Image: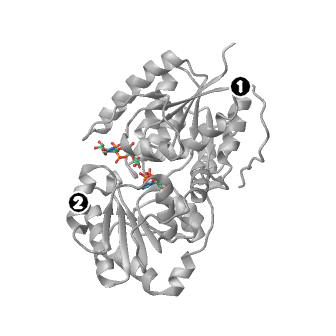
Amino acid sequence: MASPKFVCVVGTRPEAIKMAPVVLELRRFPAVDTILASTGQHKEMLEQALGAFRLKPDEDLAIMQHGQTLADVTARAVEGLDKLYDRLKPDWVLGQGDTTTVFAAALTAFYRQIPFAHVEAGLRTETIDNPFPEEFNRRAAGLITSLHLAPTNWAAGNLVAEGKDPKTIFITGNTGIDAVLQMAKNVQEDWYPEHGGRVVLLTTHRRENWGEPQRQIARACRRLVEMFEDVLLIVPMHRNPQVRELLTGILGGHPRIRLIEPPDYDKFVKLMQRSTIILSDSGGVQEEAPAFGIPVLVLRETTERPEGVEAGTAKLVGTDEETIFGEARQLLCDPAAFEKMAHAVSPYGDGRAAERIRCLLLSKVGVTSPEVKMWTLEP
Ligand code: UD1
Ligand code: UDP
């Protein structure tokens, strides 16, 4: 008889990073067949992220095109995944997070009546169009999910409040914390520019920040560098040409601003650890920075990750130039304000999320595996 088959679908950098620990954990158990499938929504950034875990997709739909619209990505991913599921006949499909890839992976599994497991389920904001289109993607995936793998108690509570069957909801911790803790051990040497002073790290790519919000973010950062002579601003640029053009226009040509290619994940983790503060609109970076006690200013109007804000290491500052500049300046010149934020907490996980997910999935297909202590929902 054929082994039970799991198809793990990824498409973008964060999905690759957060799915990798699950794939590696499932592959420790040869009683199940674990296939890594990529839509290829991202190309170089996906290869790079998987490469940090020495993984390569077993299947690649290679759909990325420059200037792709949301509808392009959805249409090509659904079409390709449908054929893939037909050929592979998975017992379960796994998807991660809130991208167009996870929406397509869940929808297509639903059409073929294949059970879908959602990794990082239950994150929510109050408005369907912010973050855009991610809030829609994760809610839609949640509608057709058979196994909700919530990273935190808060996320699980959101699913319960929506009326999902509590028997399908489990708190696992975020697999991104498994990934970041593993990577933190990997790279020992410093690779970034030699600099005696402080490093400020900026990443920005969000669709709702394209254009004017990103312009304000970039201007605020340039003003920071001009004000603090010991500060080096490092900006790993997302590969989206539109984002690059804007950042280069405002931040280019300054001796203490480095606009760099996105470093490999292990190197990026090392760079986060070297940073005094981080300014970012990234979901994953918001989760990782608290694990190292690096204050992170979240360049968004709303967040589906309130735990870091509650724990005090993250602060939601929006995208207004004056506010960003003011908040960052305070952290850089007021040691008390800095110390208040700079403490290591890990509200998103303990590094064992993939083990919990493995335990749940294997029990679904009747394969016994070592138990892991599960977390229970607290009111
Ligand atoms: C996507 C996700 C977003 C996630 C982000 C992570 C959706 C709708 N958006 O946004 O939720 O936070 O990934 O980074 O799913 N590009 C390359 N090479 C790459 C990757 C991207 O050249 O390896 C360029 C291409 O021109 C591409 C563009 O970036 O068309 C945008 O990529 P896309 O996946 O559509 O959107 P992101 O903004 O990356
Ligand atoms: N990351 C990386 N290299 C970079 C920037 C980010 O490896 O140059 C990692 C980061 O540590 C996190 C993930 O990529 O794990 C976040 O991806 P991104 O910000 O693109 O997406 P989001 O999390 O916002 O969906």
Residue at (42, 66) in percent of width and height = 192
Q: Position of residue 2 (x, y in %)?
A: 66, 15
Residue type, label 1: Ala
Q: CA distance from mark 2 to mark 1?
A: 50 Å
Q: Answer whether residue 15 is visible to the viewer in this image.
A: no
Residue ID for mark 1: 31
Mark 2 sits on what residue?
246
Q: Quadrant of ligand 1?
A: top left
Q: Position of residue 227 (x, y in %)?
A: 31, 84
User: Quick one: quadrant of the N terminus?
Assistant: top right
Contact flag, marks 2 and 1 (Cβ < 8 Å): no
CB of mark 1 near ligand 2 (< 8 Å): no
Q: Which mark is residue 162?
A: none
Q: Is residue 299 left or right of residue 164?
A: left
Whole-percent x and y of residue 17? 51, 46
Mark 2, secondary structure of its residue: helix
Colouring convention used in this rendered image of the protein: one colour
Along the line of sight, the residue nearer the viewer: 53 or 333: 53
Q: CB at mark 2 closer than 8 A to ligand 1?
A: no
Identity, as a three-letter code, of the amino acid under mark 2: Leu
At 58% from the left and 67% from the top, the residue drawn is 292
Q: Residue furthest toward the front?
A: 189
Rendered residue at 51%/86% (across/down): 335
Give whichever of discs 2 and 1 has the lower sequence position.
1
Q: Is residue 186 above or below residue 367?
A: below
Q: Could you say which quadrant of the image residue 215 lies in?
A: bottom left
- In screen coordinates, is 103 left or right of 204? right
Image-quadrant location for residue 210: bottom left
Give the SS element for disc 1: loop
Q: Measuring from the top left, give residue 235's x and y in whole percent.
A: 35, 64
